[in-house]
Image (cartoon, helix red, strand yellow):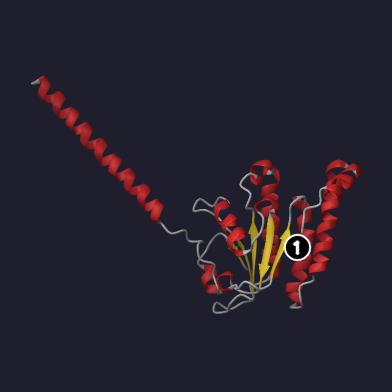
Amino acid sequence: MRMRWIIRALSLTVILFAVLTAACLSAFAQAAIMPNPFEKIPRTVSEAKRLSHGVMFAGGAQDTDEFKTYSFFLIPDDKWPQRNRPELSSLEEAFKNFGAKIGGQHLAIWFTTLGYDHDVRRDQEFCRKKFNLSVSEGPYVVMMRKHPDDLKKDDKVLAIKLNNISAERVQHVLNILVEDLHSGAAIHEEAIELERLLQIFLSAKDKHGLTGIVIALFKLPSN
């Protein structure tokens, strides 16, 4: 009698283990095939409204309006957030401020995973395949006047390198782009580049004093 109860208990344990294993495998399989809701870059305001995270636009545009420009915030180096963790949240905040300033006809995009972490994989993919940018020279803000799916080889893409600029100084560089987008004029790339270099030197000075400027002169990122 006792042996029968032991056998029954073991059988129930095996069945329960099998059921739990199947449930876990099913959950993992569903997670694997679940589409990332941020995979598609929206073209219109109504499409962007369906995404609660990863895109930003302000008021002033109709739901059916297509965006005039697309600006991406990209951190393609997976080691950068580890080396610069205190800067990461400040840098993300600077880009979100940029997105709030440019208005409803322009879209600001940053890639996230389903868990809302920074999606390094997609950043790397866009840098290498779409924009031909080096992984090591990020973070970047990349702006274009076409939807990225419509880009052709010779289409103009503005890539602003933010490496070696402290997070609190990044906004000075982005403000020039904000003004150009508001005015609808041509983008003043030379002014953006001069401001970028100035903020590299000032960031180095903030960190190392006057010696930092000398160091920055010898470590300017390549163009």
Farthest top residue in view: 2
Residue at 55% in and 59% down: 53
- Relative vertical location of residue 144 with respect to residue 117 in this rendering, above or below: below
Within 10 Å of disc 1 (Cα), the crowding (few <14, some 14-19, many 20+) is: many
Q: Kindly identify the amino acid type of the residue bearing the numbered disc 1.
A: Leu
Q: Quadrant of the N terminus?
A: top left
Locate residue 132, reporting x and y percent. 64, 61
Locate residue 59, reporting x and y percent. 63, 72
Position of 101 compared to 146: left or right? right
- Relative vertical location of residue 124 with respect to residue 61 in this rendering, above or below: above
Position of 169 compared to 78: left or right? right
Farthest right residue in view: 210
Farthest left residue in view: 1
Q: Secondary structure at mark 1?
A: helix
Tell me where residue 35 sits by quadrant.
Answer: bottom left
Residue at 29% in and 40% down: 20
Residue at 51% in and 66% down: 40
Residue at 61% in and 47% down: 78
Locate residue 85, reporting x and y percent. 67, 43
Position of 216 compared to 37: left or right? right
- Relative vertical location of residue 189 with respect to residue 63 in this rendering, above or below: above
Q: Give 133 or 209, whichever is nearer the viewer.
A: 133
Q: Give 136 or 97, whichever is nearer the viewer.
A: 136
Q: Give 193 or 168, whichever is nearer the viewer.
A: 193
Position of 209 compared to 71: left or right? right
Residue corresponding to mark 1: 174
Question: In this figure, what is the number of numbered marks?
Answer: 1
Locate residue 216, reporting x and y percent. 84, 48
